[in-house]
Image (cartoon, rainbow, N blue to C red):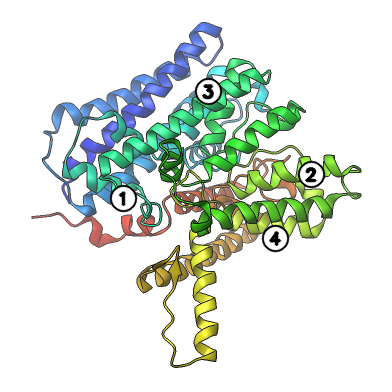
Amino acid sequence: MRFHVVLRYVAYALLLDAFFMGVSCIISAVNGDDAFMPLLYSTLVVTLFGLFPLIFVPPASGISNREGLTIVVLSWFLSCFSGTLPYILYGGPFSFTNAWFESVSGFTTTGSTILTDIEILPQSLLFWRASTHWIGGIGIIILVLSILPFLGIAEMVLFRSEISSMGRENFHQRARKAIQILTGVYVGLTLLETVSLLFCGMNLFDAVTHSFATIATGGFSSKNASIAYYNSPVIETVIIVFMVLSGIHFGFIFAVITGKSPNIKKLTVLRYYLLALLAGVILTTVNIHGINFDGWLESFRYAAFNIVSVGTSTGFATADTSIWPSLSQLLLIFFALQCACAGSTSGGIKTNRIVLIGKSFRRHIIQLMHPNAVVPVRLDGRIVDEELVSKSVLYIVIYLVIIFASSLLLTLSGVDLLEAFSGSVAAIGNVGPGLGAVGSTGNFNYLPAFAKWVLTVTMLLGRLEIYAFFIFFTPANWKRVR
């Protein structure tokens, strides 16, 4: 491991964070609010730490896979740490633990918050809070690579390290082209939603921050009541559309824009994703009708928004889902576990793995009935590598084990079982709200400090898709290359 090379590339991520801090600082200066000095100091400190490695460390011609993975994970950790500075220096509700929780929740696009009164914060700090979503949504390293000149082998290694193998599945282009597609779709969707929300009556600040949160499938709102504050079916419809789009593989969206998209009937994962959301909305509508809401249209409105919000790991809310019937809550838990497609900004297990497990189960049933039959797992007419199926099964098992371990640690710290379990599911899936006191209208402020630290680790595990996190802390990963 060449530590100096790792630090040089991590420095780019810190400078990206410093840029958005600087923009937040400008907003503070324009508004004349009391977050100017905290943001200014934070910008200067993070900029200095980002510049030092670039000044004193010579550029390297290439990096190894191990170095690439270390750069990605360290960039996430240090970005989360640097993201605490504006909060800590501002003070108020932000102890170090609370600042760390809010920062990790932002960068991992989880959207859980410790804030009991969001609207009391100045707009500049709320913009920084929303920016952490947008930086983390597509991936810190992907954003860095999109603005850096061509880096040859290093670029390819970093792209592979940042994007999971499941997410790279539909990208048949070279790393540079894939990065351009990802960032192009990401920026395009953000701009399009911002304009759409402006037409719906939102002011510019709210339109930008809510677009950052939607396209990153994050969920931080600038309002205490989240999207319920606006009480606008039109705004909710626009956000639903962009939440659904943000949960689709960006490569497919690019293909649709360029007129090269295949028939949706041949895209099993996408078809399952859309049909699962539709089924969830219909079941929830029927379940909450007459119990939580009187009219069918009203029931459909709230079911559609909140199911899609959880099912894409966004986490916005228009209702208190903690008082919904048990069936609706179980559906919310299911969608919080599954979430959307690989190659999007969504968290969770991903619909791709769910589809593979379903097809593998079907294959196993056929083989039990016909022991001599050779039945490969096929997806969209292609035979799926057995190793990919095995990896998907293993990933889901580890994913569920982590939820159990996190829930256990939270209950040991005195957290109620429902809130411990749903909070853990929401944390690893980067969904945001759980049920009960940590539900869609609650927050995580009341949790003990230990529980908050457990949940932040769980958030990072989910955002880094587990394996990278554990490899990073493996002693062998830190051995020097001679």
Q: Amino acid at mark 2?
A: Phe
Identify the element where label 4 is drawn: helix
Q: Nearer the viewer, mark 2 or mark 3?
A: 2
Q: Quadrant of residue 475?
A: bottom left
Of the pair 161 and 470, the residue shown nearer to us: 161
Residue under numbered circle 4: 417
Q: Residue at x 50, y 31 (%)?
A: 189
Q: Earlier in the sequence, mark 4 or mark 2?
A: 2
Mark 1 falls on what kind of element? Answer: loop
Instruction: Count neighbours of disc 3 (C-alpha within 10 A) and say few if under 14, some if 14 to 19, many if 20 or more.
Output: many
Q: Amino acid at mark 4?
A: Leu
Mark before the other along the chain sequence, 4 or 3? 3
Marker count (numbered): 4
Q: Nearer the viewer, residue 166 or 413?
A: 166
Seen as rendered, the residue at the extreme left is 482
Q: Quadrant of the C terminus?
A: bottom left
Where's residue 401, x and y in %? 52, 67
Residue 463 falls left or right of residue 448: left
Would you say 376 lies left or right of 53 here? right
The alpha-carbon separation of the residues under discs 4 and 1 comes to 44 Å
Q: Is residue 236 visible?
A: yes
User: What residue sits right under mark 2 in the picture?
Assistant: 300
Q: Residue at x 62, y 18 (%)?
A: 198
Residue drawn at 43 percent across, 48 percent down: 343
Q: Amino acid at mark 1?
A: His
Q: Residues at badges 2 and 3 in contact (C-beta under 8 Å)?
A: no
The image shows residue 177 at horizontal and vertical percentages of 29, 39
Mark 1 lies on residue: 172
Q: What residue is pinned by disc 3? A: 127
Q: In the rendered view, would you say 306 is above or below 366? A: above
* Mark 4 vs 2: CB contact within 8 A: no
Query: In 3D space, how far apart are the residues under numbered discs 2 and 3 (Cα atoms)?
Result: 32 Å
